[in-house]
Image (cartoon, rainbow, N blue to C red):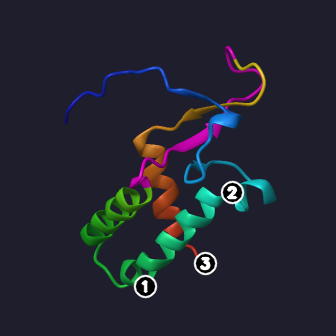
Amino acid sequence: LQARRAQSPQRVRADDHTPIDVLFGRGVPIQRNPGNIRMHRIVDSYRQQYRTSSRSDKTVLVRAAIQDIKEGGARFLRRLGENESGADGDVWVEVDDDAVYEKISHALRGNG
């Protein structure tokens, strides 16, 4: 296993989101975000194959879905909490690869 280098997450102001960025969170504003809608369309295109695949093939499908979502520069972002250091206003950070993998694999297991 390779050790991962600790990096400070990239901060993104709310008005710097692109239409294809995927936002972590809950509620209608997140659900209606164009990047999240696009993510769910892509996930939906993999769901049937995912459900009938072996465990190792599921890993490949999750990674393929992530690659499709990131195509064109999409980022996965979460909002910094009020108590997180340096959070001044509506600030978002890119999430790590493990969190992205978990989000997409959870979405693929869902009943969308």
Q: Secondary structure at mark 1?
A: helix
Is 79 within the magenta? yes
Across and down, in percent, residue 30 comes to: 72, 54
Kind of residue at badge 3? Gly
Q: What residue would you read off at disc 3?
A: 112
Kind of residue at badge 1? Gln
Is disc 3 surrounded by few (<14), some (14 to 19) or many (20+) residues within 10 Å?
few
Tell me: residue 61, above or below residue 84: below
* Residue farthest along the left direction in this orientation: 1
34 with respect to 26 (left or right): left
Specify the segment rendered in magenta.
70-86
N-term-proximal mark, 3 vs 1: 1
Residue at 19 percent of width and 36 percent of height? 1
* Residue farthest along the top direction in this orientation: 86
Is residue 53 shown to the viewer in this render? yes
Q: In whole angstroms, how far apart are the C-alphas of marks 3 and 1?
A: 11 Å
N-term-proximal mark, 2 vs 3: 2
Q: In whole angstroms, how far apart are the C-alphas of marks 2 and 1?
A: 24 Å
Tell me: residue 96, above or below residue 73: above
Q: In whole angstroms, how far apart are the C-alphas of marks 2 and 3?
A: 17 Å
Label 2 vs label 3, nearer the camera: 2
Q: Secondary structure at mark 3?
A: loop
Kind of residue at badge 2? Asn
Is disc 1 surrounded by few (<14), some (14 to 19) or many (20+) residues within 10 Å?
few
Label 2 vs label 1, nearer the camera: 2
Q: What residue would you read off at disc 1?
A: 48
Across and down, in percent, residue 39 comes to: 53, 63
Q: What residue would you read off at disc 2?
A: 33
